[in-house]
Image (tube, rainbow, N blue to C red):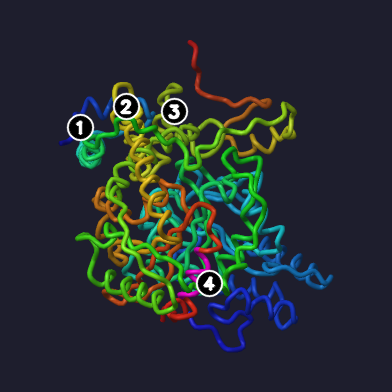
Amino acid sequence: MSAPATSALPAHASLRELRTRLDERQVSAVELAEECLRRVAASDLNAFIDVQAERTLAQAREADARLARGERGPLLGVPVAHKDVFVTRGWRTTAASKMLERYVSPFDAAVVERLAEAGAVCIGKTNCDEFAMGGSNEHSFFGPVRNPWDRSAIAGGSSGGSAAAVAAGLVPVATGTDTGGSVRQPAAFCGVTGLKPTYGRVSRHGIIAYASSLDQAGVIGTTAEDCALVLSAIAGFDARDSTSVERPGEDFTRELDRPIDGLRIGVPAEFFGDGLAEDVRAAVRAALETLRERGAQLVDVSLPKTELAIPAYYVLAPAEASSNLARFDGVRYGHRSERHTDLREMYCNTRAEGFGDEVKRRVLVGTYVLSHGYYDAYYLQAQKLRRLIADDFRRVFDAVDVVAGPVAPCVAWDLGSRVDDPVRNYLADVYTLPASLAGLPAMSVPAGFGECERPVGLQLVGRAFDEARLLRVAHAFQQASAWHLQRPA
Amino acid sequence: MPLSRDEVERIATLARIALTDEELERTAAQLGQVLALFERLRAVDTTGVEPMTHPHDQTLRLRDDVADETNRREAGQAMAPAVERGLYLVPKVIE
């Protein structure tokens, strides 16, 4: 989407650029919000589920009033979109499910609350895979999101709407959630920058739960710097999330301009095996070379349990999902089936009608692995594997500062081409799942293009709570490359 | 190896999800594929490995035993499918 030169919002403006324009009163928050709303309305990507222009403009007027009073802040007046698993007052919160088609939350998620306090202006709710389950954004009750680089390709998932919206310049930044790769993989497929923080870093309060021991809120933006600015606003302890970590707030931009000379970057052999497509391999290798030229030291390392992350994750996440989604029973909120003669039938038909295929599949798998006689063989064994996978990282991080590799084994595939093959979809998560299981922070950074001119992402994984260094490596890469500045036609 | 129809029916009942005959067939085949994926997991020797329930192995916090939520029953019940006099209505349970 190309915007006219006189437009209030230059297509893909960085937050720093928006900051200058807002502070110097060259543009108002209302003008920025109106421009985003225009672009969303004109877009054919199906990236948004709910837009409420009046509410957006009310928030923008409030931001302008704060600016007029002389208030300043990195996100004051900046447009943002929220993945539709963050509950919001005023906007619908559907989790892209028929179950919650008309649901409106009585409260805001912690992330929504914090960004509103910082003065960011909500443009709307972005499309995603139903209940964040999926890696293609084809499992949405509201239809698939299209990839702005190629409308016949998937946007990736589950935060596909957020990634596509940022890539197409509909909004400068958007929130996402990442349980097994749901921020990193769509960011890679759409050629934008995505950050999944350390588990527990950002409050889960008000995120519709999928797999609670893995769910983490994240950010999608054009640059590492933009992600750092948003993370600084949303991170921090929240007593309402039982697994929120008690750490003081941080300025995650603080290390961005430090050089990466001598930094040790681990390159795991298991991330470059047979399953990796040649186009992705070449782009990622070239990106690693760029980091080496910037002064980083590449170190060969091994994460031997990498492939076992797939079965471990696809036991643990569905098990937790089967428990979390038990709340959708047609009694307190959401869809209720008309077809019933008794309570049990009401439950069964409500859930049959309200959930899509992938959600049903995961709830059933989760129910199976937790059921009598199977618990030890599957669930407990997966938790033990999770420990071994985390131990692999611990060992590697004794020798290196950051781990780097591909985000996904291939570029975005064609819409509809893998819908009937769940296992094939699961296998494509192999490189994002290990960091999820270990609870580590990880990023996706644009690293060029592969087949059909579709984007490739470089994945960076850091030590727990080491986001500042991770962002510094990503920023250094973006100072030495221009992939993140490429725009879809 | 596909799961048996009976097995799928048993799980679907536990999960409270009604499946049509056609869905039952398809689900049996797909769950079979997913379970086949898990076989490699079962083959790993994990003797002596402590299960990891949580990334940071932290213990859950305790909070002071004081009420910290205001009563928002009306807001909570505003989106319920069926409510009467502050109560959620469900189909008759006891004959």
> Given the image, on which type of amino acid does mark 1 rest?
Leu
Cα distance, mark 2 to mark 4?
47 Å
Badges 3 and 2, same chain: yes
> Given the image, on which type of amino acid does mark 4 rest?
Leu
| Observer able to see residue A406 | no
Q: Residues within 10 Å of mark 3 (few under 14, many from 20)?
A: many
Q: Residues within 10 Å of mark 4 (few under 14, many from 20)?
A: many
Q: Which of A74/A189 is in front?
A: A74
Q: Quadrant of residue A74?
A: bottom right
Cα distance, mark 4 to mark 3?
41 Å
Residue wearing tag 2: A376
Residue wearing tag 3: A346
Residue wearing tag 4: A170
Of marks 2 and 4, the one in the foreground = 2
> Given the image, on which type of amino acid does mark 2 rest?
Asp
Query: Label 1 near label 4: C-beta < 8 Å?
Result: no
**Image height check: is A106 above or below A401?**
above
| Viewport quadrant of the C terminus of chain A | bottom left
Chain letter behind tag 3: A
Q: Quadrant of residue A142?
A: bottom left
Cα distance, mark 4 to mark 1?
46 Å
Instruction: Verify whether residue B80 appears in magenta.
Output: no
**Image height check: is A299 above or below B77?**
below
Chain letter behind tag 1: B
